Image (cartoon, rainbow, N blue to C red):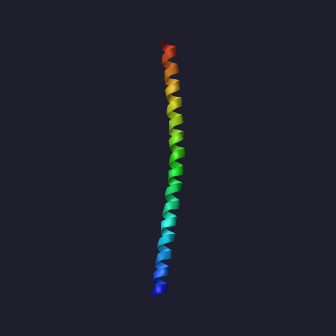
């Protein structure tokens, strides 16, 4: 009975570890995507402002 409990605990720890690993991987990807999005928005706004200034 004790061996089975240890197996279940080890399984739970393994699953938890994998979930945490996946979450941190996703967070890292989101951070890169967010930075990328910020850069795109900044470039778009810059070009928009430049175009508007040229019109005046």
Q: 11 above or below 31? A: below
Q: Residue at x 49, y 69 (%)?
A: 15
Q: Residue at x 54, y 45 (%)?
A: 32
Q: Could you tell me residue 46's position as x and y percent? A: 52, 25
Of residues 1 and 25, the one drawn nearer to the viewer in this rendering: 1
Q: Residue furthest top?
A: 56
Q: Could you tell me residue 31's position as x and y percent? A: 52, 46
Q: 10 above or below 23? A: below
Q: 25 above or below 50? A: below
Q: Residue at x 51, y 59 (%)?
A: 22
Q: How many marks?
A: 0
Q: Residue furthest front?
A: 2
Q: Quadrant where the N terminus lies?
A: bottom left
Q: 27 above or below 9? A: above
Q: Could you tell me residue 41's position as x and y percent? A: 49, 33
Of residues 15 and 49, the one drawn nearer to the viewer in this rendering: 15
Q: Could you tell me residue 38's position as x and y percent? A: 51, 36
Of residues 20 and 52, the one drawn nearer to the viewer in this rendering: 20
Q: Residue at x 54, y 40 (%)?
A: 36
């Amino acid at each position: 009975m004790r061996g089975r409990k240890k197996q279940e605990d080890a399984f739970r720890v393994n699953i938890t570890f994998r979930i945490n690993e996946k979450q941190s991987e996703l967070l890292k990807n989101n951070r890169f995507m967010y930075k990328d999005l910020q850069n795109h928005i900044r470039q778009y706004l810059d070009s928009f402002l430049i175009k508007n200034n040229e019109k005046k």
